[in-house]
Image: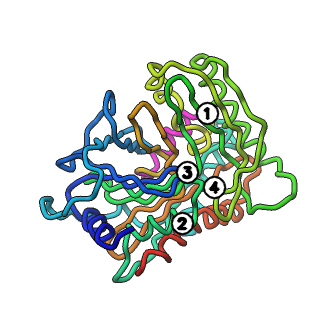
Amino acid sequence: MHPDMTDRIDALCRRQCAFALYCLPGEHEPVFCMAEDGRTEDSPIFKNGFLLAAFDGSSLFIPAEREAPPAPGEWEEIQLQPVGPATSRSKYAALFQLYTGFIRSGELRKIVLARTADIGTTSGFSACRAFCTACEQNPNVFKALVHTPQHGTWLFCTPEQLVTGSGDCWHTMALAGTRIPNLLPWDAKNKREQALVTDFIREILTPLADELIESPLENLRAGRIEHLCTRFSWKMPPCRLLQLLEQLPPTPAVCGSPVAAARALLLQNPDIDRSCYAGYLGPWGHGAVQLYVSLRCMQIFPGFCRLYAGGGLMPDSDEEQEWQETENKMACMLQAIEGAYA
């Protein structure tokens, strides 16, 4: 990206405006999206732009009225502060015990324990260069740098489709289970975890979809880790899309099972503000929708980045293994930070 564009995008990250810079899987040229006046709207209906939905269900829409970053001078500066401290190792251990207690009691079959980690940055850090690094190192996933006055600046590098398609042809995936890539069979815990997600998505799609096709289980590589993946394709008139988005997210992959009970518990937890983590995002319009689950992400603040990662707790989960899984998932954002300097 041209240095002038990089400087403009970095400057916009400090202003009272909203924009998205994104790159679809397999594409090489990023797309810039911004309203003429930098505003956000509530609904994407009948418009083209970029949709950002938080884990709590709230959403913002950035209309696609500008295709290049403007000079930032017309907007006031903004500086958001993080909500609470990052997750300590002891706090993670306490939450692990709390959440697995709900599983042992039978109230939950699975719950996703997320945590955060703060990584310091120094002078010369560029959010735009971090995005470009993520694009170079992860060509086959969805990448986005999104800034809004409500949520601040976020970088995403997610492999998980929520809903993509156009016309009457649609696609999604059940993505769960995590390990360092190897040739050994997957363990029972990861297989059960992925099956919960597959069953949930199949149940949601069956009454809405025509000609539903479910692919065989496969391994999906994402950076330094791999997941179990089941792909779904189906026919559906576009008028059912909003109904699907009311029912599908969050899936057990990022929430738990049963979804309603797990989500309620996670939203009541004051220790971890998920914000945009485990919501969804992507371009909407021009006859197509490309929405992805908000994973492998970080929020960018002056002087540091807050990384987010989570892991699915099952009855046989091991605390140290789950912690290490979140470490492995954060490696993607750590690489982006390393590449964020000139």
Number of the front mark, 3 or 4 = 3
Q: For mark 4, what is the residue?
A: 97
What residue is shown at x 51% (from left), y 65% (from top)? 134
Q: For mark 3, what is the residue?
A: 25
| Quarter of the image where one finds residue 231 | top right
Q: For mark 2, what is the residue?
A: 136
Marks 2 and 1, the one that precedes in the sequence: 2
Range covered by the magenta-colored residues = 258-275
In the visual, does 324 lie left or right of 337?
A: right
Marks 4 and 1, the one that precedes in the sequence: 4
Q: Could you tell me the amino acid type at mark 3?
A: Pro
Dot 1 falls on a residue whose secondary structure is loop
| Quarter of the image where one finds residue 10 | bottom left
Marks 2 and 4, the one that precedes in the sequence: 4
Q: For mark 1, what is the residue?
A: 258
Sort mark 4 into few (<14), some (14-19) or many (20+) by Cα contacts within 10 Å.
few
Magenta residue check for 268: yes
Dot 3 falls on a residue whose secondary structure is loop
Dot 4 falls on a residue whose secondary structure is helix
| Quarter of the image where one finds residue 180 | bottom right
Question: Label 3 to label 2, Cα distance in Å?
Answer: 11 Å
Question: Label 4 to label 1, Cα distance in Å?
Answer: 19 Å
Question: Label 2 to label 4, Cα distance in Å?
Answer: 39 Å
Number of the front mark, 4 or 1 = 1
Question: Label 3 to label 1, Cα distance in Å?
Answer: 31 Å
Residue 88 at x, y = what percent? 52, 69
Q: Could you tell me the amino acid type at mark 4?
A: Gln
Residue 97 at x, y = what percent? 63, 55
* Residue 272 showing in the rendered view: no
Number of the front mark, 2 or 4 = 2
